[in-house]
Structures are given as C-alpha cells and as structure tokens.
Amino acid sequence: MRGARPAALLLVAIATLAVRPTVAPAAERFADPIRAFVEGYDPSGNDFLANVPERTVLLRIRADLDGDGRPDLAVSDSSTWGNAGGQWLLFRGQPDGTYAYWGTLFFSPGVAVLAPSGGELTVYVRTSASRGSLATHWLDAGGITRATETTLDLEQPGDRARYESTFARGRGLPVEHCKLLEYRRDPLNCWRPGLGLR
C-alpha cells in the first residue's frame, strides 16, 4: 500500500493541474484611449476610421458608467454611424487614472440612459421607422453583460409610453465631438458638445 500512496498523490497533482483555471491576461491599459483609438487601437475589429480624415468626426462620452466614482470613456467615430447609431469602444476608468478596454456596444447617445446609481445602461436601437430593440446592459469590473432585451413598436401606445418615459428629454449620455484633423492639431481643446455629424 505504501507504493500506491505516492502514485495516488501524483494522479491528484496531475488532475489538479489539468482542471486549474487559466488566468486571462490583464486588460490593456491606456493613459489616453482616444489617442490609442486614433492610432488604430480597435480590439473589436469594427471599421473605425474608414472615412477620409477630412470627413471623420471623433465622438466621446465621459461619464461614470458603472457607478464606481471614476469617469469611464466611450469612443467612436462617424465612419461606423447610420440612422440607428454607431459602434462605441468602452473603456473603464482605473484607480490609477488609466483606462482598460471594457467592450463594444452599438447605440446612439440620445437614446442611451444610465440608471441613477450607474452600472446599468439602457439603449434603444432602431430597426425601422417605428420599431426597435430596447436593451439593458450591466457594466461592472467583470465586463459588460446584456441583461434584458425587448422589441418595441412605437406605433403601439404602451411601447411608445415606455420609450418616452425611458428616454425623457435631457436624460441621454453627454456626447462630445471633434473633427479628426482638429484633434491632430489640438487634442485637448477641439471637443464640442453634441454629435456634430451633420
């Protein structure tokens, strides 16, 4: 029996190593995610910065999206935008002042609202003139998770009322814009309120 004991321990050790969870590498951190974005950072594989520089408008949202007391950042540009909105790269603010890539969401800031305590982002994405998807996402240190999704028909009074109460005037996210060429000249002072896509 004594010879069996070391063999059993060896099997336990091998089994432990085989089922040990692997640790994912830490998310890449940036002091300036917008500069990284302009220089080509895009882990989502979207078609960002596809327009000629003269027609490209950068977009940013600075807000505490997860309610942890630190500002987070969402970055996009005009080349991914259509009538329903556009793709955003989200970066979570870190205690040391840097930002870590968090994930990608499709939305328009005028129809995107945060819960008062943060950590819950509700967006509406149009699929036709009167129909769309109402989705709620949870945002926390673990990532971004879609919690719920509902189809709305804005021609139906109940759906229209839900839409209007969710996205009451002035509740959208605070978006700013800067033309790419202006950003390259003066990245700190080029930002203006609103989408600036017209």
Image (tube, rainbow, N blue to C red):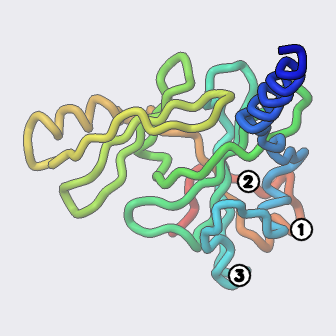
Residue in the picture at 71% in, 68% down = 179
Q: Residue at x 79, y 30 (%)?
A: 11
- Asked whether residue 153 is in view, the answer is yes
- Identify the mark nearer the N-term, 2 or 3: 3
On residue 185, the disc is 1
**Please, is residue 40 above or below residue 135 in the view?**
below
Q: CA distance from mark 2 to mark 3?
A: 16 Å
Picture coordinates of residue 44, whole percent (x, y)? 64, 61
State the residue lying farthest toward the bottom: 52
Q: Amino acid at mark 3?
A: Glu
Closer to the camera in the image, 21 or 61: 21
Q: Earlier in the sequence, mark 2 or mark 1?
A: 1
Residue behind mark 2 = 191
Residue that carries the numbered disc 3 in the rendered image: 54
Task: Work out which quarter of the rendered image holds the N terminus and state it.
Answer: top right
The numbered mark at residue 69 is none
* Element type where label 3 sits in the image: helix
Picture coordinates of residue 30, whole percent (x, y):
87, 47
Check disc 1 and give the amino acid type. Answer: Arg
**Percent of width and height locating residue 38:** 79, 66
Residue 146 vs residue 1: left or right? left
